[in-house]
Amino acid sequence: MGTHNTSSGPVITSYAKARARTVTADGGGVTFAYRELGPTRGVPVIFFVHLAATLDNWDPRIIDPIAKNRHVIAFDNRGVGGSTGRVPDSIEAMADDAVSFIKALGFGKVDIFGFSLGGMVAQALVMKHPDLVRRLVLTGTGPRGGKDMDKVAGTTYYDMLRAALTRSDPKEFLFFNRNTTGKRAAEAFVKRLEERTVDRDAPIKVKAFQTQLKAIKKWGRGAAADLSEITQPTLIANGDNDRMVPSILSEDLHRRISGSELIIYPDSGHGGIFQFHEKFAPAAVRFLAD
């Protein structure tokens, strides 16, 4: 099953204090870096991270409420942060890596929480391994072949440039509206990401980031997937003004995944779930608990 170490002790429910661990996947020889928190019982919730992100990019205000009663695991994709190997150039290959990681930890059934790129990887995984997934949360994301999905790269580079010129975090431009509300939410979000002070992750390398963008572009230009195959209970959420992965794609997912729930937050962008964490976290907890 690969090597996996756990130690008992008090249950940690704060992402800022989550233990940093590694597991080596069989066959692939990739060592994945991950963090684990919450009570280690029941079906775990695996968090699939966004473009250019490492373990340090998860909002504790979303993870912590879920970890109160659930086993939560976040991990670095292959070739990112503390994980070894090279970043794959397709979403499907990233999904295969995620399966290797989940199997290395010995899980036969998981809930998946995917944000942005992570939501694309989650869709690819559930289509190929439906038996592995119990429930699905898809946030700030879109389907393969979705309208304007291939424009993500252009928007990303443009906002990174804007951020560099103002010496701010690119996420402030990419995830939030540039009005007063958005700027306030952006500032608060970036601060929350700094709450963890120990065992921080290495930032993504430029080449790895470019490879991820290439994978998203391919996904955007790929043939539309038959999302009616997804029968898992699915929660879809986004802001109403997502410039990275157009909000209309969340509606598209909702229409095509039967029985799915859709939440669209007003006056917010790609990071709508972070801006509205006080509303979204309880909704996610409720959905995952059913």
Image (tube, rainbow, N blue to C red):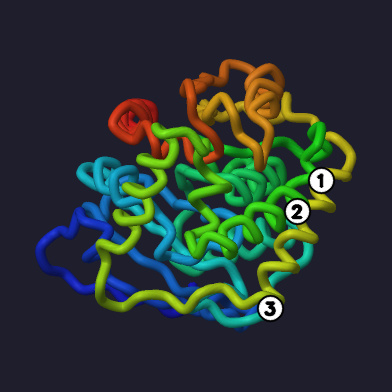
Q: Give the mark nearer the N terminus: 3 vs 2.
A: 3
- Provide the secondary structure element on which disc 2 rests: helix
**Is residue 199 at all visible to an observer of this figure?**
yes
Q: Are marks 2 and 1 in contact (CB under 8 Å)?
A: yes
- Provide the secondary structure element on which disc 3 rests: loop
In the rendered image, residue 242, in percent from the top left (x then y), is placed at 61, 34
In the rendered image, residue 79, in percent from the top left (x then y), is placed at 61, 76
Residue lying at 79% horizontally and 45% vertically, measured from the top left: 151
Left or right of 82, for residue 10: left
For the C terminus, the quadrant is top left
In the rendered image, residue 243, in percent from the top left (x then y), is placed at 65, 37
Give the labeled residue for mark 1: 150
Residue furthest front as drawn? 166
Q: Residues within 10 Å of mark 1 (few under 14, many from 20)?
A: many
Q: What amino acid does circle 2 point to?
A: Ala
Give the labeled residue for mark 3: 86
Give the labeled residue for mark 2: 153
Q: What amino acid does circle 1 point to?
A: Asp
Q: Quadrant of residue 61?
A: top left
